[in-house]
């Protein structure tokens, strides 16, 4: 049987190099695709933070020769397999360009920015084109993720034109995880790194902005054979000026090849019945032990231990995208209610300060833990009653799905993947999995929280809501099947198979 061969090219990978949700997708989707008999492999940079011993990295060659910036840069290629799978992971090793710092040079550099970031990812994609010889393996499809690898589809075309014998015209699929991050750089710097002429570049006309930067994500949109985002709603939203981040007109031209496929979550890792990170395991049939996790959480974050008071949790980057500003606007009102609030995350200094201030003022009601802490995150998912995700926009969102799996009822805004995964609770029919509000307004959020608290006070209804949310199936298999169809479509479209 013909087995489709796919190479994921991405900047992040759980557990080797995790920053955000992108890493979780790259670490989980290939496993599900492998179950569908796809030969899927992954290429990432070998950052300094990747633990060679822990992940049993093996060097395949130290002799990759990468033409870059009018020199031949030597690079190495390493290999491992994705933990608990047979999926091959290739790591490109160049200590200077790829090894320095963490995944990104800057803290919030998933958005691009400095010229070092540009050099890092430009080198990575150029080097990725040189690994197929040593590997004696070549994909049918190159699956690109986000702006970091956004120039790869154009580069494939350029190199194929120059030297078709060495550089096949790979079929490409672009997955957009977050349109807000684009990577904008000075074109002549990029061309010089890639050793190409401006006239070689296929799609320069559409650039916008005063400086006419080369926008890596825009170039990916213009040059990929197919495009998808991580939820059906976000795929529609990004065609509008409200969500399009100035790329809506580029996307509109490509709307025929743009679809949305919801992410899944790793249901083995996020399983309240077996999760070793939580105090008491539980299942949809018997979720009484959830209470033990609640008191464990209250104790961990220094809030009064009380099983009656509803605990509202949040695990997130603390940025405006995530609606943290909405919460800050109503925090004093919230502090007058009989609730406890637990926040976990890092982000904008302003929002961190606001949350810290509120914690100081209301130490018995609010606990803001300003850090990354995977263990505490699990305690919050398991021990809270309600999970907040009032995002301004949300391409997919993983937190709300994890929360539901742990019977923690989400309050979300109707945007992107939040809209596609959470069904608003209907008191009469007792259907629904959470609480959904429409407009990005703090008073709407407040009213929705109050509605949730009213249902919480009715034990039977709340139990039904927990059951509803815990019985959702968010496993990756559904998504993987849709990607499979998309790969087939891509191959047919480009007829390069
Ligand atoms: C980005 C998006 C998030 C999505 C994740 C994985 O982090 O902001 O909504 O779930 O990518 O696709």
Image (cartoon, rainbow, N blue to C red):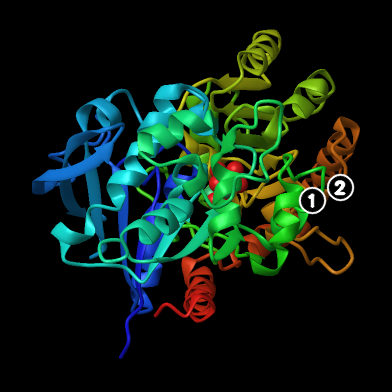
Residue appearing at x 88%, y 42% in the figure: 439
Indicate left or right for 226 with 300 as reference.
Answer: right
Residue placed under numbered mark 1 in the picture: 414
Q: CA–CA distance between discs 1 and 2?
A: 5 Å
- 58 w.r.t. 135: above or below: above
Image: 14 above or below 144: above
In screen coordinates, is 234 left or right of 276?
right
Residue 63 is labelled as: none
- Residue at screen point 63% across, 31% down: 306
**Please, is residue 216 above or below residue 407 in the view?**
above
User: Badge 2 local density, few (<14 within 10 Å), some, or many (20+)?
Assistant: few
Asked if marks 1 and 2 touch (Cβ < 8 Å), the reply is: yes
Secondary structure under tag 2 reads: loop
* Residue 63 place in picture, x, y as percent: 10, 44
User: Does residue 262 appear left or right of residue 195 in this picture?
Assistant: right
Mark 1 / mark 2, whichever is N-terminal: 1
Q: Nearer the viewer, residue 227 or 417?
A: 227
Few, some or many residues within 10 Å of mark 1 (<14, 14–19, 20+): many
Quarter that holds the N terminus: bottom left
Picture quadrant of residue 165? bottom left
* Label annotation for residue 438: 2
Q: Residue at x 76, y 21 (%)?
A: 328
């Amino acid at each position: 049987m013909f087995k489709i061969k796919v190479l994921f090219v991405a900047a992040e990978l759980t557990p080797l190099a995790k920053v955000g949700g992108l890493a979780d997708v790259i670490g989980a989707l290939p496993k599900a695709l492998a179950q569908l008999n796809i030969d899927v492999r992954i290429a990432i940079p070998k950052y300094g933070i990747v633990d060679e011993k822990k992940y049993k990295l093996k060097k395949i060659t130290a002799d990759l020769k990468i033409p870059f910036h009018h020199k031949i840069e030597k690079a190495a290629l390493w290999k491992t397999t994705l933990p608990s799978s047979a999926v091959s992971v290739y790591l490109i090793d160049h200590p200077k360009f790829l090894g320095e710092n963490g995944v990104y040079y800057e803290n919030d550099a998933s958005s691009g920015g400095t010229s070092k970031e540009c050099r890092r990812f430009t080198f990575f994609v150029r080097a990725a084109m040189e690994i197929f010889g040593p590997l004696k393996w070549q994909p049918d499809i190159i699956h690109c993720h986000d702006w970091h690898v956004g120039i790869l589809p154009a580069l494939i075309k350029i190199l194929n034109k120059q030297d078709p014998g060495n550089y096949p015209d790979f079929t490409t699929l672009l997955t957009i995880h977050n349109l807000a991050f684009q990577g904008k750089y000075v074109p002549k710097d990029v061309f010089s790194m890639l050793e190409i002429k401006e006239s070689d570049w296929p799609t320069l006309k559409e650039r916008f902005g005063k400086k006419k930067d080369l926008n890596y994500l825009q170039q990916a949109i213009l040059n990929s054979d197919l495009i998808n985002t991580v939820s059906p709603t976000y795929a529609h939203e990004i065609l509008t000026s409200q969500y399009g981040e100035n790329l809506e007109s580029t996307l509109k031209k490509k709307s025929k090849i743009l679809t949305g496929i919801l992410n899944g979550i790793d249901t083995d890792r996020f399983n309240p019945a077996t999760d070793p990170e939580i105090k008491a395991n539980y299942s949809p049939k018997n979720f009484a032990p959830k209470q033990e996790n609640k008191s464990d959480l209250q104790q961990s974050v220094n809030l009064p231990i009380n099983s009656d008071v509803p605990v509202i949790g949040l695990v997130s980057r603390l940025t405006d995208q995530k609606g943290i500003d909405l919460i800050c606007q109503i925090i004093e009102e919230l502090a007058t209610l009989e609730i406890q609030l637990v926040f976990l995350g890092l982000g904008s200094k302003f929002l961190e300060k606001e949350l810290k201030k509120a914690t100081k003022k209301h130490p018995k009601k609010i606990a803001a833990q300003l850090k990354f802490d995977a263990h505490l995150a699990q305690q919050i998912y398991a021990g809270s009653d309600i999970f907040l995700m009032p995002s301004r926009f949300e391409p997919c969102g993983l937190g709300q799905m994890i929360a539901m799996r742990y019977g923690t009822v989400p309050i979300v805004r109707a945007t992107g993947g939040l809209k596609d995964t959470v069904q608003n609770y209907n008191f009469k029919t007792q259907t629904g999995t959470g609480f959904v509000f429409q407009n990005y307004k703090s008073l709407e959020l407040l009213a929705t929280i109050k509605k949730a608290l009213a249902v919480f006070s009715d034990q039977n209804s709340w139990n039904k809501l927990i059951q509803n949310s815990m019985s959702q199936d968010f496993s990756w298999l559904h998504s993987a099947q849709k990607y499979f169809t998309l790969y087939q479509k891509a191959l047919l479209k480009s007829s390069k198979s």
